[in-house]
Image (cartoon, rainbow, N blue to C red):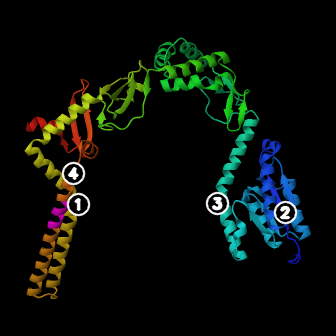
């Protein structure tokens, strides 16, 4: 039986760390123990601590601390509270966690978590159990994730590669050990050697294509030149090892490459500055590959230069058939496009066509719905007349009301359209391009071929030739 109210309450505390490294450092266990002791002291409870150092929380059977805690609760029958810093310190196995909850319930032990604040529950025992089950369900995902992380950490500590993809120049042998691939490792050595001779990523891509008949994009070459695995070093969230990858590059060569890369970044005369979308952002189409062009803004010698370019074409090696470099000076192409728009909009014929198109686009759905409603109402009225439910005078009256209602809808629709058109006329140059222009095509000589509006219903360049 539990002691009376005039006797100090008895509490037990439990702390656990997951890894041997954490246990050897001690700070994590110490932190948990201090927090638990602080709560017990604040509330005037006697406290006895249990703990497990450097052991996984997936199974209770291999943890002496939790087993001693269970024995203490079962045998003494004098424990009032169990204090933990977090629920998953008890177990990361959902089934075992529920078994512990049942043990606490049978022995009258109140569980206090300093994170989940379970000590604030004041509902009935059945309600408490339901909430605990719900909490366990929420923890299942984090439990699985933790188990995966622990498995990867264990695999890494055993010297096994935790990735299924190896860097360029390596392969897995039959024993799943990392080995150097002769042909591709020669390419890696060539890249490091040639980069130190002053060649850039794009030039290296071309040279590799010519010398080894191998396609490597500039971005991939940069990654190769920065990868420490080529000197045998692997750094992950689980630690650092130097015995998993055989070396392809000498450490001094790797260091020299990193120094040169840093120097080039610092001395690069073309310094990128923060850019905002330009006027024709996302509208221009490359005449070579038909992809949308990107915009860029760079600063050189104190001057800012804006241009549009095809980022797809420049990502290929120069010797590749798909490679192409196509650029447009922003001021030139924007001037041509805006002049075309201004010229065509001065035409009264185009203004009439454009307004009709806008009205048709905005009112199409409303007209269909209104017409369907009108037809339905008239059918119902005539059916009532045919069934003898309406007299001739009532029929005329109903039809008059229906027609008046339709006329009112039409007037209201015209008012709404006029409001929309008024808002359209207030659009500035940027607003017009963003909302109305869908795409702009140019030829290889950098002349504007088409300016398509909306869903391509209007081509301003074509209309300009016809109307003007």
Q: Which residue reaches farthest top?
A: 197
**Left or right of 443 in this view: 463:** left
Residue at 59% x, 19% y is 259
C-alpha distance separating marks 1 and 4: 19 Å
| Span highlighted in magenta in the image | 410-417
Question: Residue tagged by mark 3?
Answer: 138
The local secondary structure at tag 2 comes to: strand
Q: Nearer the viewer, mark 1 or mark 2?
A: 2
In this view of the protein, can residue 59 be seen by the observer? no
Question: Residue tagged by mark 2?
Answer: 12
The local secondary structure at tag 1 comes to: helix
C-alpha distance separating marks 3 and 1: 47 Å
Sequence order check: which comes first, mark 1 or mark 2? 2
Q: Are marks 1 and 2 in contact (CB under 8 Å)?
A: no
Crowd band around label 4 with a 10 angstrom C-alpha radius: few (<14), some (14–19), many (20+): some
**The C terminus: image quadrant:** top left
């Amino acid at each position: 039986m539990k002691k009376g109210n005039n006797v100090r309450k008895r509490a037990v505390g439990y702390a656990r760390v997951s890894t041997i490294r954490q246990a050897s450092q001690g700070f994590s266990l110490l932190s948990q123990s201090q927090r638990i002791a602080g709560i017990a002291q604040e509330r005037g409870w006697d406290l006895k601590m249990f703990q497990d150092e450097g052991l996984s929380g997936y199974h209770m059977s291999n943890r002496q601390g939790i087993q001693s805690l269970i024995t203490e609760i079962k045998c003494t029958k004098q424990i009032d509270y169990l204090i933990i810093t977090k629920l998953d310190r008890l177990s990361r196995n959902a089934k075992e966690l529920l078994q512990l909850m049942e043990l606490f319930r049978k022995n009258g032990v109140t569980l206090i978590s300093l994170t989940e604040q379970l000590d604030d529950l004041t509902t009935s025992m059945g309600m408490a159990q339901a909430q605990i089950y719900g909490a366990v369900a929420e923890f299942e995902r984090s439990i699985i994730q933790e188990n995966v992380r622990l498995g990867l950490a264990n695999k890494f500590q055993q010297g096994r590669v935790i990735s299924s993809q190896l860097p360029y120049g390596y392969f897995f042998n039959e024993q799943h050990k990392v080995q150097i691939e002769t042909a591709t490792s020669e390419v890696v050595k060539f890249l490091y050697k040639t980069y130190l001779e002053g060649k850039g990523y794009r030039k290296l891509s071309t040279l590799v294509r010519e010398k080894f008949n191998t396609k490597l994009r500039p971005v991939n070459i940069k990654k190769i030149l920065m990868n420490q695995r080529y000197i045998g070093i692997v750094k992950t969230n689980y630690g650092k090892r130097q015995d998993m990858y055989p070396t392809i590059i000498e450490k001094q060569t790797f260091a020299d490459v990193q120094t040169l890369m840093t120097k080039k970044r610092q001395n690069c005369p073309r310094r990128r500055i923060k850019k905002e979308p330009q006027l024709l952002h996302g509208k221009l189409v490359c005449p070579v590959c038909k992809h949308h062009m990107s915009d860029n803004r760079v600063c050189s010698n104190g001057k800012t230069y804006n241009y549009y370019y095809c980022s797809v074409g420049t990502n290929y090696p120069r010797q590749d058939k798909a490679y192409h470099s196509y650029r447009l000076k922003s001021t030139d192409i924007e001037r041509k496009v805006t002049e075309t728009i201004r010229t065509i909009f001065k035409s009264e014929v185009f203004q009439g066509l454009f307004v009709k198109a806008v009205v048709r686009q905005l009112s199409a759905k409303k007209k269909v719905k209104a017409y369907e409603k009108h037809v339905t109402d008239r059918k119902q009225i005539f059916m009532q007349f045919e069934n003898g439910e309406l007299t001739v005078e009532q029929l005329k009256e109903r039809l008059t009301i229906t027609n008046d209602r339709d006329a009112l809808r039409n007037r209201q629709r015209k008012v709404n359209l006029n409001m929309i058109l008024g808002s359209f006329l207030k659009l500035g140059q940027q607003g017009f391009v963003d909302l109305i222009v869908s795409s702009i095509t140019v030829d290889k000589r950098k002349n504007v071929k088409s300016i398509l509006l909306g869903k391509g219903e209007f081509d301003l360049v074509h209309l300009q030739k016809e109307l003007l």
